């Protein structure tokens, strides 16, 4: 379906013009929808490369032919910054996609989002993963439509070549051993640890009960030692190399340069596409993230993605109706069909998800899709953004070898307490 896509430049220009000409009314990004339909503007990132948006918008328009959805497309890397600028300028885009709970918390606490608690009250809350993350003082300002969490992707062909059993109920110690054996027995790295700090920090926090906002970070030490041991043993690409070469986790896995990749469920859709395009030509499976001990609960981490109503929306009621639909069964079915994990998790939705052509059909992969606990990647707090900046800077120094693990953790604690908490 051909769709009109708005740029942030045009939206910001209209908002700025409206602010200078009519105090209190920012004006609409677009004055009319196609063929007399009501326009509904929705901020998105990388529209062409993020197929969930088109899947949702096409399905919603089919069910609501009086609505003309107009995406406001923003570069993914600049998304939070651009939305911040838009809101500060009085922009009236109707629906704002919340890429993570840190941004959500910031915008909600600034009073820039509508209270949609009445919309959330009508949703099946018990089946909507990640909903709790959006409660702020008893109110909701967004509703999740997808819920990603981290698991382990593995290449069955490389495991077979190395004579290693497929991963099942694996501990971090076993993960290191398996990665080193595959690296020794094949031409591939045993695993690929992406450069994001969440792989170390959020995993450690989720599985040890650590608090990433609290200012005490001793719980990170074991996971840092795992990451550094793997690269020192030649079982994983060095963090500095991956950073300088801007290595993508997809390219490492799809070209069989790495036998395992811990990554979020959002990668499933891209991997299926690579498989269909003939880029990834091997048998693969899913396993739970490695755990501290075997035989217990499976704990991982993740983050919901949500829609919110701009506090200055031009079409508030239509925006609320779209969010209720996207978070419900019809929205969940629309994105499950293309391999994106919806927030609404029912048996029927999960069955449809694993019925997609190319999805692994083994029991282990299905089990990995249902972890016992999926903790938030970062707690929702007005302090989250400032703490995130400090932890990211210190993480880079540790992984590049410019600081020892102990020195880096000590500096995280000192800086968070002095610069944020005190």
Image (cartoon, rainbow, N blue to C red):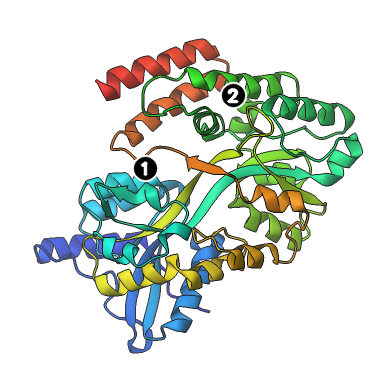
Residue furthest to the bottom: 35
Q: Based on the displayed image, in which of its 4 quarters is residue 401 positioned?
A: top right
Mark sitting on residue 79:
none
Residue furthest to the left: 23
Image location of residue 351, percent across then percent down: 66, 65
Mark 1 vs 2: CB contact within 8 A: no
Ranked by sequence position, the earlier of labels 1 and 2 is: 1
Mark sitting on residue 102:
1
Name the residue carrying label 2. 223
- Residue at image coords 38%, 47%: 133
Say few, some or many: other residues with alpha carbon within 10 Å of mark 2 (under 14 / 14 to 19 / 20 or more): some
- Residue at image coords 24%, 60%: 114
Of 106 and 303, which appears nearest the observer? 303
User: Relative to residue 190, is residue 402 drawn left or right?
Assistant: left
Say few, some or many: other residues with alpha carbon within 10 Å of mark 1 (under 14 / 14 to 19 / 20 or more): many
Image quarter (top left, top right, bottom left or bottom right) of the C terminus? top left
Image location of residue 349, percent across then percent down: 59, 66
Q: Secondary structure at mark 2?
A: helix
Say how many tags the image has. Answer: 2
Of 349 and 145, which appears nearest the observer? 349
| 3D distance between C-alphas at marks 1 and 2 | 23 Å
Image location of residue 372, percent across then percent down: 57, 44
Can residue 248 be seen in the rendering of this structure?
no
Of badges 1 and 2, the one in the foreground is 2
User: Relative to residue 169, is residue 416 drawn left or right?
Assistant: left
Q: Based on the displayed image, in which of its 4 quarters is residue 27 positioned?
A: bottom left
Of 305 and 299, which appears nearest the observer? 299
């Amino acid at each position: 379906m051909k769709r009109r896509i708005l740029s942030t430049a045009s939206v910001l220009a209209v908002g700025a013009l409206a602010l200078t000409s009519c105090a209190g009314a920012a004006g609409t990004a677009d004055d009319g929808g196609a063929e007399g339909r009501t326009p509904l503007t929705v901020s998105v990132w990388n529209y062409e490369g993020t197929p969930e948006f088109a899947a949702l918008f096409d399905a919603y328009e089919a069910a609501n032919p009086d609505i003309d959805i107009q995406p406001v497309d923003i570069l993914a890397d600049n998304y939070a910054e651009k939305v911040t600028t838009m809101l500060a300028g009085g922009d009236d885009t109707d629906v704002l996609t919340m890429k993570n709970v840190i941004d959500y918390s910031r915008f909600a606490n600034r009073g820039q989002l509508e209270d949609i608690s009445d919309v959330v009250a009508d949703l099946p809350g018990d089946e909507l993963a990640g909903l709790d993350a959006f409660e702020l003082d008893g109110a909701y300002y967004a509703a999740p439509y997808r819920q990603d969490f981290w698991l382990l992707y593995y290449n069955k062909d490389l495991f077979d070549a190395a004579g290693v059993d497929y991963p099942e109920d694996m501990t971090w110690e076993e993960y290191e051993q398996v990665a080193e054996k595959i690296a020794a027995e094949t031409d591939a790295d045993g695993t690929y640890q992406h450069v994001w700090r969440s792989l170390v920090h959020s995993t450690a926090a989720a599985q040890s009960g650590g608090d990433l906002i609290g200012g005490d970070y001793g719980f990170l030490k074991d996971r840092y030692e795992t990451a550094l041991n793997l690269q020192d043993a030649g079982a994983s690409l060095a963090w500095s190399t991956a950073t300088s070469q801007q290595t993508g986790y997809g390219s490492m896995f799809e070209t069989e340069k790495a036998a395992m990749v811990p990554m979020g469920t959002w990668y499933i859709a891209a991997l299926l596409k690579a498989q269909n395009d003939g880029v990834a030509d091997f048998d693969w499976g899913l396993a739970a993230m490695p755990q501290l001990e075997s035989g217990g609960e499976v704990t991982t981490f993740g983050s919901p993605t949500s829609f919110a109503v701009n506090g200055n929306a031009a079409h508030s009621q239509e925006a609320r109706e779209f969010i209720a639909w996207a978070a419900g069964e019809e929205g969940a079915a629309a994105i499950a069909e293309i391999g994106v994990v919806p927030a609404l998790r029912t048996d029927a939705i999960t069955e449809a998800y694993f019925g997609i052509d190319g999805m692994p059909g083994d029991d282990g992969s299905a089990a990995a899709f249902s972890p016992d606990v999926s903790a938030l990647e970062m707690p929702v707090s007005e302090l989250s953004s400032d703490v995130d900046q400090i932890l990211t800077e210190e993480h880079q120094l540790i992984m590049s070898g410019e600081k020892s693990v102990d020195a880096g953790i000590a500096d995280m604690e000192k800086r968070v307490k002095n610069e944020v908490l005190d």
